[in-house]
Image: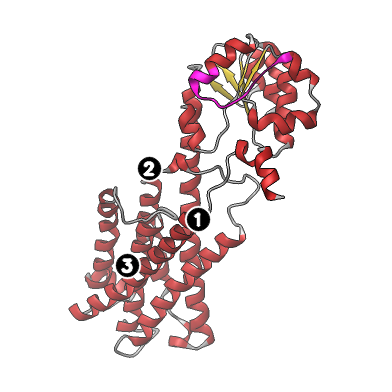
Amino acid sequence: SVRTAHRAGIEVRMITGDHAITAAAIGAELGLGPGSVGGGELQAMTDEELSTALPNLHVFGRVTPQDKLRLVDVMQSGGAVVAMTGDAVNDAAALKKADIGVAMGSGSEVTKQAGKMVLTDDNFGTLITAITLGRNIYGKIVSYIRYQMSKLFSLVLLFLAASIFNINEGVALTPLMVLFQHFFITLFPVAVIMLDPPPPDLMNKPPRDPKMPIAHRSAVAQWLAYGVLQFAVTLAAMLLAPGETSTSEANVPMTTAFVVLSLGSILAGLTMRRDPESGVVPPVLGAIKILTIPTVVTVFAVEAGVLQDLLMTTSLTGAQWLACLGWSLIIPVVVELDKAIRRRRLAQAPAPLPATTAVAPERARSLH
């Protein structure tokens, strides 16, 4: 659990009432990190000195409840998000002060009330499991919003372009086509995103900045770029399809736009389920099984007589179906290329320096 926490960019420190020598021996066995200090030495430090020394201190022995509270304050002042564990009544103040107070299930009721989380099994490893679950849930929320916003932008742009340039009298798709997309097509890619297992390198990434909202500048730019991609492909397929458009009779161009938007949404869900990881690497069979459902539904929407009358679609020839598939494949290809470029940039970026290296006097001298 400690190794997993370190890979995830999480510092683990032991703060105990036991003697510093005993605590340091256990800390070394666990691989917590360098440096140990006793309560008397800790109290002799100023906050500035403690903040400077903190990257090289991972074990604190013979501490008082006031020391725990002070350590939380100093770490938070340095910009850290602090989770503090405790079980005794005198730990309650530190747990209350911490960003995430974690009480032990075997601890006092006062501590449980002060904390935001209770470890019923008193197991540190459960904390790491909770962090893994939290990262996975957050990633799914981001993927879901990315997918939905991209689809929304594409529809808005499609109708906007149809109105501005008077394409088919401003009607790119019928209202029932849009509702059909929402209820019977988009639902399944969303299910793929929600049911996707955690990426294997989930706990090898550094923590995200909690101050950064989901809708930050680069995220909105990505949503808009993917939306423009889906819009452009759908509009091009509609304009280049054979036949005349009509607002009152089923026609090939509108049907082509409907099919391309459907298949594009299905394939976009497959690729957007992860970012920047590829969406077409294993495990992918489960996602493909789910996405066969909206694919079959799309075929029925175009070829079944009842749905043709309802949605105002018309049957397509084999060549036209292949053309729709070709247009739709542009979307996942471009999305995967974008992610591959970003992964390469991340791989080429210099790795962040460990805290002990960054504050080392030798590095300071070499920079001057």
For marks 3 and 1, give the CA distance.
19 Å
Front-lying residue, 167 or 284: 284
Q: Is residue 193 above or below residue 328?
A: above
For marks 1 and 2, give the CA distance.
22 Å
Q: Nearer the viewer, mark 3 or mark 2?
A: 2
Say which residue appears at 47% left-offset and 77% top-offset: 158
Amino acid type at mark 1: Ile
Residue 20's x, y, as percent?
64, 13
Disc ID at residue 200:
2
The quadrant in which residue 201 appears is top left
Amino acid type at mark 2: Pro
Q: Are marks 3 and 2 in contact (CB under 8 Å)?
A: no
Res. 129 in view: no
Residue 106's x, y, as percent?
55, 11
Q: Nearer the viewer, mark 1 or mark 2?
A: 2
For marks 3 and 2, give the CA distance.
28 Å
First-in-chain label (1 vs 2): 1
Per the rendered image, the range of residues in magenta is 27-39
Front-lying residue, 282 or 362: 362
Disc ID at residue 263:
3
